[in-house]
Image: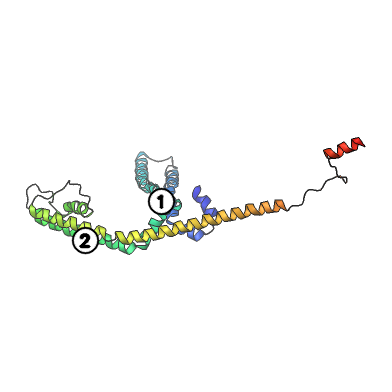
Amino acid sequence: MEYFLRLVTTSNLKHFVKSALNFVDVVAVMPYFIQIIFEAFVMDSEDVSAKEDLKTMSRVSKVSKVLKVIKLMRIFRILKLARHSTGMRAFGFTIRQCSEQVCCLFLFIAMGIFTFSALMHSVEVDQPGTPFSSIPDAWWWAAVSISTVGYGDVVPISYLGRCVAFGCISFGIILNGMPISILFNKFSDYYAKLKEQEYRVSNTERTFQLKKRLRRKFDNCFEPPPEDSDDEIHYRPRVGQTIHEGED
């Protein structure tokens, strides 16, 4: 209902349809209606055999599993909070502007994982009780080491394997420090621009409200007094005037 109301009241339909957040809303809501329609069409026939009924139930269960996976898209609806958060908007702008640098970072991480996992497997494969029995088994260790998390659940046994591990960790430290300055500069610049824009908008709104109040007060000051319905002017005599009249 919320989506259709926003669709009806939007001023730019093309931009509304192309919005990623609105697409997430549609995908998150559609499984509910698809399941209702599917069950209504499939279960409509009453003259079915037991075998066909079992087939139908299996089909419905498979579709339900797929729809449950699609319903997980509701999690991404939390991204709608970015509309009301300056920091989230600045972060999204930073990722869009630095997309090439971010892609290069992930490319180097993938290259490091494949390289160091192959080296570790070659060094540790002959050690008894080694956890690096294959290159895919070493991927987890390489990913944890390059990210400098270091869980310690998988460790090399030989001294040569420890040297490879030291090289992997050093590569991760250097790699993770490279794009931070670029991302931080972009983020801080755009965040400052958003804050300045919000300040200008709020200042303009306050100025407009102040001018509106001053104009109203000015109009009230120079507004002509209401005319009396009677032609005679009624006034109250002063105290001194009343005393003199009594003496006369």
- Residue type at mark 1 is Leu
Residue 141 image position (x, y, % from top left): 18, 51
Q: Nearer the viewer, residue 90 or 233?
A: 233
Check disc 2 and give the amino acid type.
Met
User: How packed is label 1: few (under 14 Cα within 10 Å), some, or many (20 or more)?
Assistant: few
Location of residue 190 in the rendering, given as x and y in whole percent from the top left corner: 41, 60
Residue 125 visible in the picture: no
Give the residue pinned by disc 2: 111
Q: CA distance from mark 1 to mark 2?
A: 31 Å
Up/down of 225 relative to 100, above or below: above
**Pointer 2 local density, CA inside 10 Å: few below 14, some 14–19, many at least 20:** few
In depth, the one of 224 and 29 nearer the eye is 224
> Is 193 situated above or below 63?
below
The number of discs equals 2
Between 15 and 96, the one nearer to me in the picture? 96
Residue identified by numbered label 1: 79
The picture quadrant where one finds residue 113 is bottom left
> Which label is found at residue 185?
none
Q: Earlier in the sequence, mark 1 or mark 2?
A: 1
**Towards the viewer: 18 or 178:** 178
- The reply, left or right, for residue 130 in relation to residue 8 is left
Residue 56 image point, x, y percent:
37, 43
Q: On the image, which quarter does residue 52 sit in?
A: top left
Question: Element at badge 1?
Answer: helix
Residue 213: x and y in percent read: 63, 52
